[in-house]
């Protein structure tokens, strides 16, 4: 027997959740689907395929205050901003949820990043299984699946009668407390088939190809914008600097990207990673070599956003394929 | 057309006249073109041109300064190239221009084949590049200009300043400051962009509305009289900010004030680089 | 989810300790020595670190940057940094006067394993501001002089005015079994010492690699040529140690600025032997 919620009860449930949580859900903004806080269930856009941006920003925001610096009566005080309230990300895709698993390893390792950890603790993830695959999708090749429930608190799967409700964690249990669930014998739909990408031996292949001309050739067409890093659910490079606004001083952390030319430039001008190829290698090196060596998984969830939004079609699947070939025999780099 | 491009590329590479041909090949979706650098005759066989060749490749020439290069350009790209030559970023003698007759570029997204022409192409008045060393494709009669397609242009023109500000605030709010617009723009080649400067720090690191607003508007001003309307910035924006509306508005302002269209004539400096006594300034007139 | 165990005490790892500038000494035309006192007495007592470790110093309103600690904790005389005025943070710090508030976040990184070097001859080579993180190494050896073999210090700079810690030279040079070689790229009217580049001084001096450790710090170009000279003298990569500099924003292996291939300068370093460096994927 499965637990099921009807479409109308789903609406009622979301409206009930809104009393307790800030509900962040896919919405339609102009022609884009984006995760935004919603005011009512009707604001949610369920037929979104994949959103333009991952919901990463709700745990790791583009801009956040690490602490404020105030001086009162000659005494300086550093204060961290107060905790956010309870958040619930509704209809998160399994790949995007897996992104949080990858970020957890970085930000929750001691010393835990307080800001990320507090948000993580106060955020409930209601997953939505994918009923169809897009051409850029390859989650099954990097450890995920269109119906993977392992990184969400509740997984919803759309069926004819409504949504199957798979409660995964205690947090999920708490979130469905107000949902009207019915027991029904429903066979879950089989997940969509995805074209596999070989990732076998990719860590070793990346290492073998480390000093190959491949990177400079690939970088020929790379524009070195930050799109790939900013749309990625797993990229986490950041910058930290102070900001003074109307007499208020704060230390901020903001998204950054290893592709930016000044990313590693030290005061005085020396840049250890001066070429476009070296910068591009950092991106793929991090995803396919450094992170896996440090934490085990590839730093990629297969959402395909970087593929679809790259201005010049640098396709990580193609890069993996090329790297594997490079290790075996000398091939002219596809650039 | 593909064959003409490949043949010329091979000839240029074989003779050593150029060391690289920058053109297009077919992307990883098997549908849409992407930029392609051919260094050998064998690689030149990968060159292709079709109605998905949206990228403006001329910016790549800046990185290849000092190295003779051939490049495939559409009419709009050729205008951008003229701007870069006029601004002394590219040396004309270092470039072999393969001009492609363009029937317009199809609006498409990765993985999907589109059918309609891009907005900029629907109102474009040029099929044949103004400058080239070799023309590929059959020249054809140039169309008559049409009104801008994006209805928002007319709507914006009729708005009050406050309404326009509200419109742009909503658009800019989505900006991620990913710099994709800058990185693809042939007009944005500063060694250090004002937004990256730390000392003085003109724009802080916040990815927040004041900084987004400042970034997008200053960039638009820096492009006034220089932007050729290739709309690459708008195409690559991951959050669909209609940057073309901003750039086209400035292009029209410059055309009205200075009777100038960038990249149309070689050796005519941009209005903001020069001063003429009889120029209208749009102040008190 | 185990990483979110509620029992783990969570303190904001980006929050620096407040400190007060106690003393500012002009070491060279562009390098100042800052003596800082951590404001919280408990923090001050517990702030332990070793030669080679670094900490971030905050200029509030601008930002923070990592700098090598150049004092030793048991001196109980404050935390010291030698800062060259070169970027936005160091410029703001250089403008500070005694009494000003700064932030100190750290210590981070590994350190020179001086315990392991007991009984060995030590060759210390510092170029310009690169001498700064070597000062606590020298002072540790001098404080425990009998524990170590011969100590040779080569300190070079662009000009005589650019030599750091000049007021300590006498005490270094007069210590038992210690030799101090000063050299400059360009002398002046008052300079009677050597005018030579550091690698040439090394070549001239011909230090023996027998039972020796060479500790290097300086600009990349100096490191490159000095390393070559040392190798000619048959120093093995494992006998040569350096401390690397990199842009950093966190010190916790997260911001992805200081990694050299799969190694982080902040977490795996900053102290590396050249044997370790030879295995790094990228140039440093």
Image (cartoon, rainbow, N blue to C red):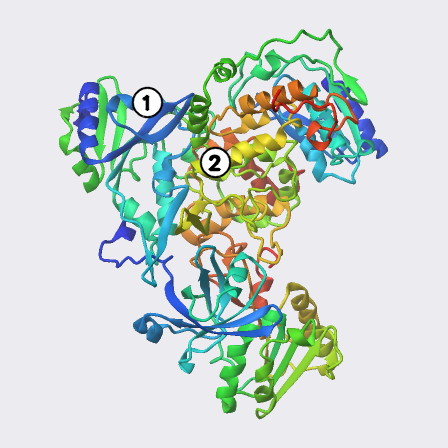
Q: Quadrant of residue A49?
A: top left
Quick check: B156 left or right of A155?
A: right
Name the residue: 56% across, 32% down. Answer: B181
Q: How many dots with numbers?
A: 2
Disc 1 vs disc 2: which is toward the camera? 2
Name the residue: 42% across, 80% down. Answer: C77
- Residue B264 visible: yes
Along the line of sight, the residue nearer the viewer: C154 or B162: B162
- Residue B53 visible: no
Protein chain holding label 2: B
Q: Secondary structure at mark 2?
A: helix
Protein chain holding label 1: A
Location of mark 1 (residue): A45
Quick check: C51 left or right of B227?
A: left
Q: Of the numbered discs in the image, which one, if any, rests on residue B212?
A: 2
Residue C115, given in percent of the width and then of the height, sits at 47, 80
Residue A40, given in percent of the width and then of the height, sits at 24, 25
Q: CA distance from mark 1 to mark 2?
A: 26 Å
Would you place residue A220 above or below residue B258 in this image? below
Residue A58, given in percent of the width and then of the height, sits at 34, 39
Position of the N terminus of chain B, as image quadrant, is top right
Structural crowding at the residue carrying mark 1, measured as other residues with C-alpha within 10 Å and reported as few (<14), some (14–19) or many (≥20): some
């Amino acid at each position: 027997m499965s637990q099921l919620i009807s479409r109308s009860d789903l609406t009622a449930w979301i409206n009930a959740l809104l009393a307790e949580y800030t509900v962040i859900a896919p919405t339609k903004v102009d022609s884009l689907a984006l995760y935004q806080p919603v005011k009512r269930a009707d604001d949610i856009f369920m037929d979104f395929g994949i959103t333009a941006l991952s919901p990463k920003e709700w745990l790791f925001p583009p801009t956040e205050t690490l602490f404020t610096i105030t001086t009162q009566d000659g005494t300086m005080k550093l204060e961290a901003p107060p905790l956010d309230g309870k958040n619930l990300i509704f209809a998160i895709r399994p790949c995007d949820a897996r992104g949080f698993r990858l970020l957890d390893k970085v930000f929750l390792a001691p010393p835990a990043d307080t800001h990320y950890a507090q948000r993580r603790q106060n955020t409930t993830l209601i997953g939505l299984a994918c009923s169809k695959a897009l051409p850029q999708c390859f989650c099954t090749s990097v450890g995920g699946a269109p119906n993977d429930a392992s990184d969400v608190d509740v997984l919803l799967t759309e069926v004819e009668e409504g949504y199957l409700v798979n409660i995964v964690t205690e947090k999920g249990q708490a979130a469905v407390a107000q949902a009207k669930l019915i027991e029904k014998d429903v066979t879950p739909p089989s997940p969509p088939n995805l074209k596999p990408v070989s990732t076998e031996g990719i860590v070793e292949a990346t290492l073998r190809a480390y000093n190959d001309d491949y990177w400079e050739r690939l970088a020929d067409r790379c524009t070195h914008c930050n799109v790939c890093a900013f749309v990625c659910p797993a990229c986490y490079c950041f910058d930290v600097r102070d900001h003074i606004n109307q007499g208020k001083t704060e230390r901020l952390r903001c998204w950054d990207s290893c592709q930016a030319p000044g990313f590693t430039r030290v005061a005085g001008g020396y840049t250890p990673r001066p070429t476009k190829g070296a910068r591009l290698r950092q991106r793929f090196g991090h995803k396919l070599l450094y992170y896996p060596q440090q934490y085990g998984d590839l730093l990629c969830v297969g959402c395909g956003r970087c593929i679809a939004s790259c201005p010049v079609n640098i396709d990580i699947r193609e890069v993996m394929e090329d790297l594997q070939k490079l290790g075996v025999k000398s091939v002219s780099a596809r650039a | 057309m593909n064959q003409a491009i490949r043949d010329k590329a091979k000839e240029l590479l074989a003779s050593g006249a150029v060391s690289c041909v920058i053109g297009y090949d077919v992307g990883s979706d098997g549908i849409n073109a992407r930029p392609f650098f051919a260094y050998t005759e064998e690689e030149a066989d990968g060159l292709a041109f079709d109605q998905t060749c949206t990228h403006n490749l001329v910016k790549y020439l800046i990185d290849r300064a000092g190295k003779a290069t051939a490049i495939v350009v559409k009419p709009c790209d050729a205008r951008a190239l003229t701007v870069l030559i006029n601004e002394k970023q590219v040396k004309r003698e270092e470039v072999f221009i393969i001009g492609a007759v363009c029937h317009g570029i199809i609006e498409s997204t990765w993985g999907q084949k589109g059918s309609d022409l891009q907005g900029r192409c629907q109102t474009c008045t040029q099929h044949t590049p103004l400058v080239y060393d070799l023309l590929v494709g059959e020249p054809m009669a140039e169309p008559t200009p049409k009104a801008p397609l994006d209805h928002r242009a007319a709507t914006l023109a009729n708005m009050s300043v406050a309404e326009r500000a509200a419109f742009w605030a909503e658009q800019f709010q989505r900006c991620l400051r990913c710099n994709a617009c800058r990185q693809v723009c042939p007009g944005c080649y500063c060694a250090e962009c004002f937004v990256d400067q730390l000392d003085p720090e003109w724009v802080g690191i916040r990815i927040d509305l004041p900084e987004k607003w400042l970034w997008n508007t200053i960039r638009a001003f820096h492009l006034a009289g220089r932007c050729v309307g290739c709309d690459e910035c708008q195409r690559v924006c991951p959050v669909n900010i209609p940057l073309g509306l901003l750039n086209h508005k400035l292009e029209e302002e410059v055309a009205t004030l200075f009777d100038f269209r960038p990249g149309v004539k070689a050796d005519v400096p941009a209005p903001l680089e020069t001063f003429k006594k009889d120029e209208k300034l749009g102040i008190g007139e | 989810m185990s990483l979110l165990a509620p029992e783990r005490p969570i303190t904001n790892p980006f929050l620096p300790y407040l400190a007060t500038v106690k003393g500012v000494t002009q070491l060279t035309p562009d390098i100042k020595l800052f003596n800082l006192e951590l404001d919280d007495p408990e923090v001050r007592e517990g702030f332990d670190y070793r030669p080679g470790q670094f900490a971030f110093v905050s200029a509030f309103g601008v930002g923070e940057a990592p700098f090598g600690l150049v004092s030793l904790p048991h001196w109980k005389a404050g935390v010291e940094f030698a800062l060259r005025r070169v970027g936005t943070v160091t410029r703001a710090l250089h403008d500070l006067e005694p009494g000003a508030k700064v932030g100190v976040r750290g210590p981070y990184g590994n350190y020179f394993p001086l315990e392991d070097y007991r009984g060995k001859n030590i060759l210390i080579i510092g170029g310009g501001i690169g001498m700064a993180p070597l000062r606590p190494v020298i002072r540790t050896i001098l404080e425990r002089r009998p524990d170590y073999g011969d100590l040779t210090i080569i300190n070079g700079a662009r000009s005589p005015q650019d030599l750091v810690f000049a007021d300590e030279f006498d005490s270094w040079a007069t210590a038992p079994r210690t030799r101090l070689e000063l050299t400059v790229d360009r002398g002046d009217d008052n300079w009677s010492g050597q005018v030579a580049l550091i690698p040439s001084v090394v070549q001239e001096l011909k230090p023996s690699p027998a039972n020796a450790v060479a500790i290097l710090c300086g600009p990349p170009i100096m490191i490159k040529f000095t390393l070559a000279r040392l190798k000619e003298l048959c120093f093995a990569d494992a006998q040569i140690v350096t401390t690397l500099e990199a842009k950093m924003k966190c010190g916790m292996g997260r911001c992805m600025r200081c990694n050299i291939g799969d190694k982080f300068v902040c977490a795996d370093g900053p102290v590396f032997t050249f044997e370790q460096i030879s295995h790094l994927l990228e140039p440093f």
